[in-house]
Image (cartoon, rainbow, N blue to C red):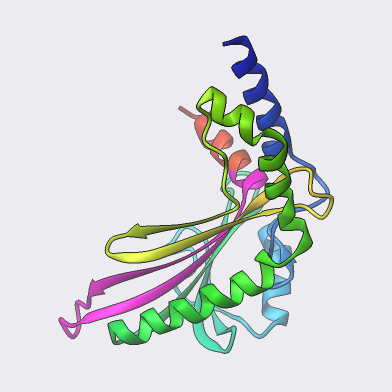
Amino acid sequence: MRKKLLLLSLLFVVLFAHAKSEHLKFMGIPLDGKISSFNRELQKKGFVLDAFSGKEFDGYIYNGIFAGEKAQVFVYFDAKSKIVYQAAVIIKRYSKDSVIKLYEDMRDMLDEKYSQNEAVRFYENMLVEYGEEMKEEGITPFQWKRTTEEEGYEATTICLPNSERNHLLGDIKVFVRDMISNVTNSTEYYLFIKYSDWQNDNSQRKNRMDDL
């Protein structure tokens, strides 16, 4: 038991230690700092603030072009500190085949961009060094990339380490959802690509919990 606790502690420190100087990036912009600063940087890339920002959604909504596709970008930030912690891209399609093809294209491009990055070898190194001990202690190895099924569609999550490969910055998740339109009563399909910075996400969660 003591060995297991020590191993768990070590893995926790390695995987989740936070460095204040580096954060996950969205379109080259760190998911960090005040929303006012993030807003300026995103608008420089051609995104326009949506009229519904701050009304039906507790954050900012932008319209623009993402990876060659017309998209909306939802930016989440802490209500108290105004620090940005997450951005979600939403791309609309009108057929299942079309959204699945788009999902596969985006998944493959994310895989090509990030999984072949040398920094990702961090995870493989962890398994090489601690894999047997994890197996002996019944600890499931953390996977840097995982594919699951959610609501009938494949979903892919890629977790990214920092440049020094000594802790994780956050994750990028790509997935599909469908819903019935209230206007046309037909099914509409949406591709989501969600970028989450773990350090700031945990901070905003803690701020919310302080009120409970």
Q: Is residue 62 visible?
A: no
Per the rendered image, the range of residues in magenta is: 172-201
Q: For residue 93, say whether it is visible.
A: yes
Residue 112 position (above or below residue 134): below
Residue 86's x, y, as percent? 58, 57
> In this view of the protein, which residue sits in the foreground, 132 or 157?
132
Residue located 19% across and 77% down the image: 182
Query: Considering the image in quadrants, where does the N terminus appear?
Result: top right
User: Is 137 situated above or below 193?
Assistant: above
Specify whether 146 is left or right of 99. Answer: right
Where does the C terminus fall, quadrant-wise? top left
Question: Is 200 included in the stretch rendered in magenta?
Answer: yes
Left or right: 140 in relation to 127: left
In-image side of 32 versus 49 (left or right): right
Residue 81 belongs to magenta span:
no
- Residue closer to the observer: 28 or 118: 118
Q: Would you identify the image quadrant in which residue 14 lies?
A: top right
Nearer the observer, 175 or 114? 114
As drawn, the residue found furthest toward the top would be: 2
Q: Quadrant of residue 10?
A: top right
Question: Where's residue 125, x and y in %?
Answer: 73, 45
Q: Residue at x 67, y 31 (%)?
A: 11
Going by the image, does 144 lie left or right of 148?
A: right
